[in-house]
Image: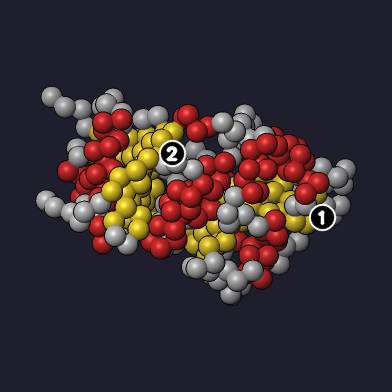
Amino acid sequence: MTTVPFDRRPYAGAEDLREMQDLAERLWTPGATWHVGDLAWERFQHPGGEHEWAAMLWDVDCGTAAWGWADAGHLSLLADPAHALLADEVLDWFAARVPDPARTVTVSSAETHLFPALGRHGYRRTDEGPFFLHMVMDLDHGLPEPIPPAGYRLRAVGDGDVAARVAAHRAAFHPSRVTVESYQAVRRAWPYRPDLDWVAEAPDGSAAAFCLVWLDEANRAARIEPAGTVPGHRRRGLARAVCLAALHAARRAGARRAVVSPRGDDAHPVPARLYRSLGFRACARSLGHRAALSG
């Protein structure tokens, strides 16, 4: 097999993150694994996490056509279907970096152009553990109005709210490594917009629930990542209200579709049930693959 001439280079900073995002934007579909916002969130949510992962980019004459992101023994990758054989290059790089035969790769069921490379490299689908649904909804029709419980207020996050916003995140996802420092880095990242970062404020002024939406302007596609509710405020409709408030803000900003990827397995069914109640429907799911043991 042959492929077009390419250059391979290690990730070197913010400009390369934009290259990775540009490829994600160009290839995006509702069932895709990666949205431009996912890359910003995953890159900056944990302070000092750079040593835990490595990324490599593959460039052809039209720009970045593939990338791989290795986090310990797990790989995320993106490859342009027009240069699908670059997926083999990504998998070769991953195998050289992580010789452990227990290597894992996750792709979307919608990313069928990656399946042949996974097969050639000895990966087999595994249904072990959790998986994620890729869900989509139309924002132009039938988006319900947000109705917060009595005493709660829905509003966008301001500069003075970061500590409260982080405290809510850490409580909702305990244990969490998100800090004020890392969240400030998220807020500085493209394409973060403060008008799409919402909280449900409790009567005591604390953040009781939150929803951050990322906007891909080129595809007019909004992405929820993350959303959560502080344990003491659950079962009051706050997650529904704050997500709807953020989605209405995204529609005002130009989004016409929204996507979200909650757990799809029976061990964690509540988020998917919430998003279905808002109007989301499943269009794809994550597929885990494990390198087959030799011999």
Q: Dot 2: what SS? A: loop
Query: Who's the residue at 65% across and 48% down the image?
Result: 187
The image shows residue 233 at horizontal and vertical percentages of 75, 42
Foreground pick, 37 / 18: 18
- The label shown at residue 103 is none
Q: Dot 1: what SS? A: strand
Query: Who's the residue at 59% across and 40% down the image?
Result: 45
Count of labels in the image? 2
Residue placed under numbered mark 1 in the picture: 153
The answer to whether the residue labelled 1 contacts the one labelled 2, judged by CB atoms less than 8 Å apart, is no
Foreground pick, 224 / 267: 224
The image shows residue 87 at horizontal and vertical percentages of 26, 48
Horizontal side of residue 263 vs 104, given as left or right: right
Horizontal side of residue 36 vs 114, given as left or right: right
Q: Amino acid at mark 1?
A: Arg
User: Closer to the observer: label 1 or label 2?
Assistant: 1
Query: Who's the residue at 34% across and 43% down the image?
Result: 9
Whether residue 277 appears in this view of the structure is no
Spatial CA span between label 1 and label 2: 34 Å
Whether residue 211 appears in this view of the structure is yes
**Mark 1 vs 2, N-terminal side:** 2
- The label shown at residue 130 is 2
Corner quadrant of residue 76: top left
Q: Considering the image in quadrants, where does the C terminus appear?
A: top left
